């Protein structure tokens, strides 16, 4: 395998000049830089990460901390992060900080302190205050994908607007007995749920239906959405005509519960979610689409800017989700309406 010495010899320059030309650290004339780059290409030279680190003072590596790697939202964000980092020739170190685990404590107490990265991406971590303090004390840029802290830059969706628009969609179809399903229980993302509840409550209040506001707690998962919906829908006296689910997984759980109880969706019950989960189309779920893969790409772009300029102040980039109308919602008392994909 060719090394920097071989590149320098072929280009007719010193080793230090070849290194400067390929790393961008220090002045090299355009003609010399072009000659060195052509020599490197012809030899198939791949710069050593260690050598780059020595010349630039950077590790060429980004740390990614997330609570789950096998759930839809997080895996989608991770794909976006990885694609953006690979395009920049950067490495990725993934820390799977499962909530409440010994592994999470080790990550925050030991591994992050080794500083083997140029910056950190915190994806849905919702770190406790001492964990956030430790992340920021490392002296490395931190960018969050969803997160409540004004002390880091954040990429997020407008959760309140998403729930408001979901509720307004049902109100426009004539529904009045609308329940919000999936908040108020034990959760790892309280600020997300509280914002979505606020959007639902605002839409109901603006429609003069403050007395109809009803929240049913459920952890944000299909099994918990299913269990909560079975309990709620089994009482015919208080059964709603429509459900705003805190996320698509809860919405899918509610649809399965309704089917098992013999309640037709959407002719007897309309259900809308938030996410556009990979299962949403399978269940013909009307939803507010967020794009986690794009959030991951945007987070890398923003982190890169913070690495280049450590004095750059934190900022929040808020993405408004798009309404995707499928067949899980319909005018009250009517059957399914034709599917309209507004992507």
Image (cartoon, rainbow, N blue to C red):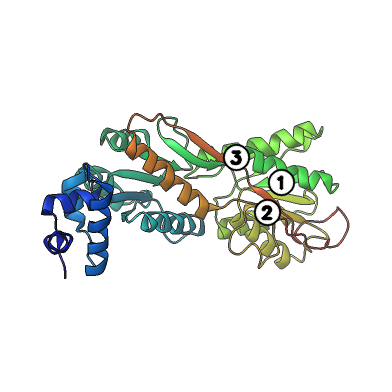
Mark 3 or mark 2, earlier in chain: 3
Residue 296 x, y percent position in the rendering: 46, 51
In whole angstroms, how far apart are the C-alphas of marks 3 and 1? 12 Å
Foreground: 160 or 237?
A: 160
Badge 3 crowding class, 10 Å Cα cut-off, few under 14, some 14 to 19, many 20 or more, is: some
Residue 126 appears in view:
no
Left or right: residue 17 compared with residue 168: left
Circle 2 residue: 287
Quadrant containing the C terminus is bottom right
Residue at 88%, 58% (x, y): give it: 334
**With 4 as the anchor, is 23 left or right in this view?**
right
Image location (x, y in percent) of residue 200 = 69, 39
Residue at (27% x, 33% y) in the render: 137
Residue corresponding to mark 3 = 158
Looking at marks 1 and 2 on the same chain, the residue that comes earlier in the sequence is marked by 1
**Mark 1 highlights which residue?**
166
Foreground of the two, 78 or 41? 41
């Amino acid at each position: 395998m060719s090394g920097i010495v071989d590149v320098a010899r072929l280009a007719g320059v010193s080793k230090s000049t070849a290194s400067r030309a390929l790393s961008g650290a220090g002045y090299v004339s355009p003609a010399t830089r072009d000659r060195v780059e052509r020599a490197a290409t012809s030899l198939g030279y791949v710069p050593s990460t260690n050598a780059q680190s020595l010349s630039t003072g950077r590790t060429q590596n980004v740390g990614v901390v997330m609570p789950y790697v096998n759930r839809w939202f997080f895996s989608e964000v991770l794909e976006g992060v990885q694609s953006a980092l690979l395009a920049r020739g950067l490495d990725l170190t993934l820390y799977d900080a499962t909530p409440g685990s010994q592994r999470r404590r080790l990550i925050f107490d030991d591994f992050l302190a080794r500083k083997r990265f140029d910056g950190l991406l915190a994806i849905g971590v919702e770190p406790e205050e001492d964990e956030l303090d430790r992340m920021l004390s490392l002296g490395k840029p931190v960018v969050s994908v969803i997160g409540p802290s004004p002390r880091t830059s954040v990429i997020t969706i407008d959760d309140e607007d998403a729930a408001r628009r979901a509720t307004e969609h049902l109100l426009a179809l004539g529904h009045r007995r609308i329940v919000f399903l999936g908040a108020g229980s034990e959760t790892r993302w309280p600020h997300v749920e509280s914002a979505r509840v606020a959007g639902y409550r605002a839409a109901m209040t603006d429609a003069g239906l403050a007395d109809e506001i009803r929240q049913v707690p459920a952890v944000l998962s299909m099994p918990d959405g299913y269990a909560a919906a079975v309990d709620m829908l089994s009482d015919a006296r208080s059964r709603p005509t429509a459900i705003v689910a805190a996320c698509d997984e809860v919405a899918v759980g509610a649809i399965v519960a309704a089917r098992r109880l013999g309640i037709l969706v959407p002719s007897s019950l309309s259900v809308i979610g938030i996410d556009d989960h990979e299962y949403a189309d399978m269940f013909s779920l009307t939803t507010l689409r967020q794009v986690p893969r794009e959030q991951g790409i945007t987070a890398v772009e923003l982190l890169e800017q913070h690495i280049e300029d450590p004095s750059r102040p934190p900022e929040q980039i808020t993405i408004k989700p798009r309404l995707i109308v499928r067949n899980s919602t319909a005018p009250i008392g009517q059957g399914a309406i034709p599917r309209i994909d507004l992507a």
